[in-house]
Amino acid sequence: MAREIVKPLWTLFSAIFLIYLVNGAAQPQVPCYFIFGDSLSDSGNNNCLFTVAKANFRPYGIDFPRGPTGRFSNGRNLVDAVAELLGLDSYIPPFATARGMEILKGVNYASGSAGIRNETGRQVGQIISMAMQLQNHQSIVKQIASLRGNNYSSAEEYLGKCIYSVGIGTNDYFINYFVSLSNTSRQYTPQQYARVLIEQYSQQLRTLYNFGARKIALFGLGAIGSAPSEVAACGTKGSSCVAYINSAVQIFNGRLKSLVQELNSNLTNAKFIYIDYYGIGSSYALSRGSLITNVSCCGVKNGLNTCIPFQIPCRNRTRFMFWDGIHPTEATNVFIAARAYKAEFLTDAFPYDIHSLAQLS
Ligand SMILES: *[C@@H]1O[C@H](CO)[C@@H](O)[C@H](O)[C@H]1NC(C)=O
Ligand SMILES: *[C@@H]1O[C@H](CO)[C@@H](O)[C@H](O)[C@H]1NC(C)=O
Ligand SMILES: *[C@@H]1O[C@H](CO)[C@@H](O)[C@H](O)[C@H]1NC(C)=O
Ligand SMILES: *[C@@H]1O[C@H](CO)[C@@H](O)[C@H](O)[C@H]1NC(C)=O
Ligand SMILES: *[C@@H]1O[C@H](CO)[C@@H](O)[C@H](O)[C@H]1NC(C)=O
Ligand SMILES: *[C@@H]1O[C@H](CO)[C@@H](O)[C@H](O)[C@H]1NC(C)=O
């Protein structure tokens, strides 16, 4: 009699196990994920910095299980959503607090208000520029090598399997070039500025490659001109002002896409990809006819683009594209991450999407 029960139970158990294997639920697609960038990716690095670019107070995090954490959104940010899609079992910890063995799964170096240029964001306080994020990564690489018995070839092999994402450059426009009478706008035309930025970014990406990174996803810039803060700043100058800003960032995006191609052909075994953040964001706005795109969900102070602390935000966050003056809502982040991960159109990702990048050996 016992046998009669055991057999069906065993069959059931095997069936469940098989489903589990097929779904691959517990199987992350990569062992590690390292994140560089600005407030679109920051998960708490600015909390202890002396800066106004902070998001560790309500209403930020209102839809995040742990509440306000320093993420510049109501809930998950772009890289949280990417981490979920990669099957990682937790979000990547910020460099400010990452300790011990957890660094093996990846570290998030991103800092709100940071840019490609060292001076970008300085006017709002302390920042961790892209150059400094790379220095922080260098110290983590050393710790990883030591965790692997100071065997550098083993550390290199491991680091080559990780996914890296970099989303930076927005602030080089938003709080640098397009600040009225800025040094950079007096010095460069939009064409020249994009070239100068891409040259510096190219050097930074080579440094990242030299630290063992091989699978690198680069997020292009969004339609900054159409964000509520710029729409408000353009004021009566209206749509031509918005269009001028958007065309400047598109020059940068075009050059970034070419850079991906160049780096892939110049650097042995490099697998850089470009994510069309601008195009995916625009198609989100178009696909949801009733989406509110020109007004932020939370109340923002004039001149500042972050939420007024402790004010009650809009009720239905999914109806809004933007959470504050410049940062997307969780719903927008999740949509963009999904298309970056699994491209729906050929133009979403170049030459392929994050899912394909993860599968490559
Ligand atoms: C930017 O800062 C880093 C140190 O954080 C320095 O090594 C680098 O030379 C600086 N770059 C420029 C262009 O000033
Ligand atoms: C270092 O790691 C490599 C690659 O994993 C391995 O082949 C080699 O045997 C290791 N060397 C030592 C001294 O453990
Ligand atoms: C602009 O240039 C001037 C003169 O070179 C310099 O003193 C100032 O710090 C610069 N401002 C910024 C924001 O970099
Ligand atoms: C790639 O190599 C070509 C030919 O050597 C060189 O002209 C170009 O500047 C390199 N580009 C990058 C991004 O390294
Ligand atoms: C936002 O767009 C709506 C609909 O197009 C328009 O009625 C409203 O005036 C706009 N608000 C701002 C602040 O631009
Ligand atoms: C929130 O907005 C979405 C999109 O417009 C809509 O589908 C949903 O029903 C709204 N939810 C509530 C609770 O109003």
Image (spheres, rainbow, N blue to C red):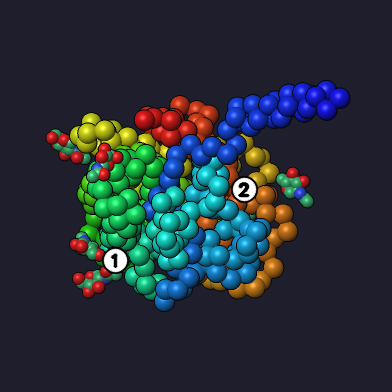
- Left or right, residue 119 beside residue 52: left
Tell me if the residue at label 1 has its CB under 8 Å from ligand 3.
yes
Viewer-proximal residue, 219 or 98? 98
Q: Residue at label 2?
A: 331
Q: Which mark is residue 144?
A: none
| Residue type marked 2 | Ala
Q: Position of residue 37 (x, y in %)?
A: 39, 55
Q: Quadrant of residue 216?
A: top left
Q: Check the image and report above or below for 270 versus 192.
A: above
Q: Check the image and report above or below for 327 versus 29.
A: below
Element class at badge 2: helix
Work out how far the residue at label 2 is from the one at label 1, CA to CA, in angstroms: 32 Å
Q: Earlier in the sequence, mark 2 or mark 1?
A: 1
Q: Position of residue 133 (x, y in %)?
A: 33, 59
Residue located 28% across and 36% down the image: 270
| Residue type marked 1 | Glu
